[in-house]
Every structure is written in C-alpha cells, then in structure tokens.
C-alpha cells in the first residue's frame, strides 16, 4: 500500500474518531456510578467538573442549566410564536438509568419546529424536585422532553409539576415503571406510546440558551420551559424516585448563574389566541 493512500485512510479514520468523540461527549451520561446528587459525597454536582476531563463545562461553563426564571430578567417576545409540535405514536422503551427513569422512542416519534429548525423527539425523563425554579420557587417534579436536530443540536422542553391530581401521562406508564423498579439499568419494552397524550396546557413559555443538566453539561441547548405548572400525585413522584433505588432524595442539579443571558417569554397576542 503506497504512502499517500495510507495517509488518506489514516485521515479518514481520525475524522470518524473525532466525530464519534464529539457525538458521545455531547450526550447525557447514563451510568450513575460516575456521578450523583449527594452534597459532600465527592461525586455531587459541585464536583462534576472535576470527575472527568470531558465534563469541565460542569465547572467552567458560563451558560449552564438549570436557572432561576426571574421576572426582572424576562423579556416578553410575542414573535417567538407558539410551539409547533408534530408528534406521533410509536414503539418505546422504558429505561432505569440509575439516576432517573427515561422513556425513549425506538422509531421516529415526530418533531418540533423552532426558528426554522426541525428537532426530532428522542426521549422523556423526570427530575424531582424540579431543576428550574420560578422566582426562587422549586416545584415537586420536572419533565424533560429531549429533541435533537439532524446536525446534532439539542432542544429540550421542560414542564414543571406541583402536588395535586395525578398526571395522566405518567398514569399510563405506572405498571411499566413498577416493573423496572430496583433494577439497575433495567430496560422494558412498553409498546406504542403516543407523546401527544402528554398535556402541556399552556401556549406561554420561557426560552433561553443553556446546557444539559447532567454531565457532560454540554452547552448550546435550546430550552423551552412551559409557563403553566401542571399537577402530579405524591404517589407518582415517590414511584419515580423509589424506582431508581439510588438512596438519594433528589436528582435535581442546583440552579446555575444566569451570567447576563437573555430570558424570553412568549405570550400570545390576542390574534394568536384565535388562530
């Protein structure tokens, strides 16, 4: 084999390797043994940036999530427009990731369109208590709907819950969550799940640029936090925490510095409400 051909093959191999490295390090870490949420444990949120060289943004990033959504920092921007969701039912799996419960679609479950970009729905997961706060108030639960564009950009829709009536979408999953409880990295086929069954209940939302809330804390995530606070039963929250059996009372990262970031609020104009 001649030298130029070797050089071309080596270059191609390195390109693939670098692409793979960027892809894997931009995704959420799924092994709970690498980190936890316990303050003072040496592996809690205050130490995430020191545990792995690829997690430095957890310590040094200036656009980290979650944040406190303060009224005085919010700018109303009606031109953001309502969320354009186009979801569909498809097969899914439920996975116990050790630090949370994740519902992941096997096939395409549809997408959302934001600023002309199509983001495909990949998975839902839950944090308790909520990670984002509003005026300093932390709610009982937060769901993250994780989407990704064809060029690897991430968009997450966050929905917060307070204790009250059961959430109907979680009710559909109760028996499946019970089946993988106490099973480290347990996985279960749950058949066809329709993401349209998830109720959002409000057209108003906050929008800002942040990061993943677990290592590697990748930045550039487009966050959409639904303004309406929905309800979930105390039993449903307990089931989500008990199922992972990690001995931690919470799996929520503390709020991070806003650092002069813009926080926008979409509030429909009267004409938009009639459309």
Image (cartoon, rainbow, N blue to C red):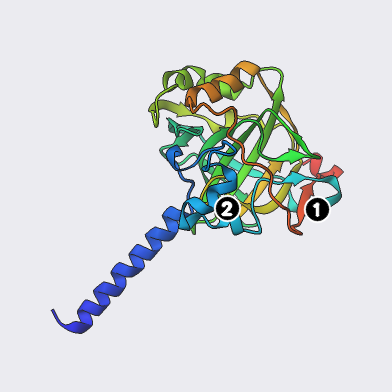
Above or below 220: residue 160: above
Q: Residue at x 30, y 74 (%)?
A: 11
Residue 168 lies left or right of residue 42; in this view the side is: right
Front in this rendered view, residue 274 or 29: 29
Above or below 227: residue 162: above
Q: Which image quarter holds the N terminus?
A: bottom left
Above or below 20: residue 85: above
Which numbered marker is on residue 58? 2
Residue 219 in view: no
Residue furthest left as drawn: 1
Front in this rendered view, residue 246 or 76: 246
| Cβ atoms at labels 1 and 2 below 8 Å apart | no
Q: Which image quarter holds the C terminus?
A: top right
Q: Position of residue 256 (x, y in %)?
A: 68, 49
Task: Return the residue at label 1.
Answer: 77
For the residue carrying disc 1, how many other residues have a C-alpha within 10 Å: few (<14), some (14-19), or many (20+)?
Answer: some
Above or below 264: residue 173: above
Query: In whole angstroms, how far apart are the C-alphas of marks 1 and 2?
Result: 30 Å
Residue 223 in view: yes
Q: Residue at x 81, y 40 (%)?
A: 135
For the residue carrying disc 2, how many other residues have a C-alpha within 10 Å: few (<14), some (14-19), or many (20+)?
Answer: many
Q: In the figure, residue 250 lies in which quadrant?
A: top right
Q: Position of residue 169 (x, y in %)?
A: 58, 24
Q: Position of residue 141 (x, y in %)?
A: 65, 30
Residue 162 lies left or right of residue 105; in this view the side is: right
Q: Residue at x 49, y 28 (%)?
A: 246
């Amino acid at each position: 084999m001649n030298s130029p051909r070797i050089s071309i093959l080596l270059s191609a191999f390195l390109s693939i390797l670098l692409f793979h490295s960027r892809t894997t390090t931009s995704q959420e870490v799924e092994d709970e043994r690498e980190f936890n949420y316990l303050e003072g444990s040496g592996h809690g949120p205050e130490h995430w940036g020191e545990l792995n060289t690829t997690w430095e943004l957890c310590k040094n990033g200036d656009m980290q999530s979650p944040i406190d959504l303060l009224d005085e920092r919010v700018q109303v921007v009606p031109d953001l427009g309502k969320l354009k969701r186009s979801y569909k039912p498809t097969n899914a799996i439920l996975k116990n990731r050790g630090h949370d419960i994740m519902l992941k679609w096997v096939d395409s479950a549809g997408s959302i369109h934001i600023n002309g970009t199509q983001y495909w729905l990949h998975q839902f997961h839950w944090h308790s208590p909520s990670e984002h706060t509003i005026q300093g108030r932390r709610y009982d639960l937060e769901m993250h709907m994780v989407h990704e564009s064809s060029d690897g950009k991430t968009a997450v829709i966050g929905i917060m819950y307070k204790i009250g009536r059961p959430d109907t979408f979680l009710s559909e999953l109760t028996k499946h969550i019970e089946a993988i409880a106490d099973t480290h990295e347990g996985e279960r086929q749950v058949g066809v799940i329709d993401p349209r069954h998830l109720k959002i209940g409000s057209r108003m939302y906050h929008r800002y640029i942040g990061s993943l809330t677990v290592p590697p804390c990748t930045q550039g995530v487009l966050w959409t936090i639904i303004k309406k606070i929905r309800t979930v039963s105390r039993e449903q929250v307990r089931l989500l925490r008990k199922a992972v059996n990690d001995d931690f009372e919470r799996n929520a990262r503390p709020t991070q510095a806003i650092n002069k970031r813009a926080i926008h609020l979409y509030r429909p104009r009267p004409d938009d409400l009639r459309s």
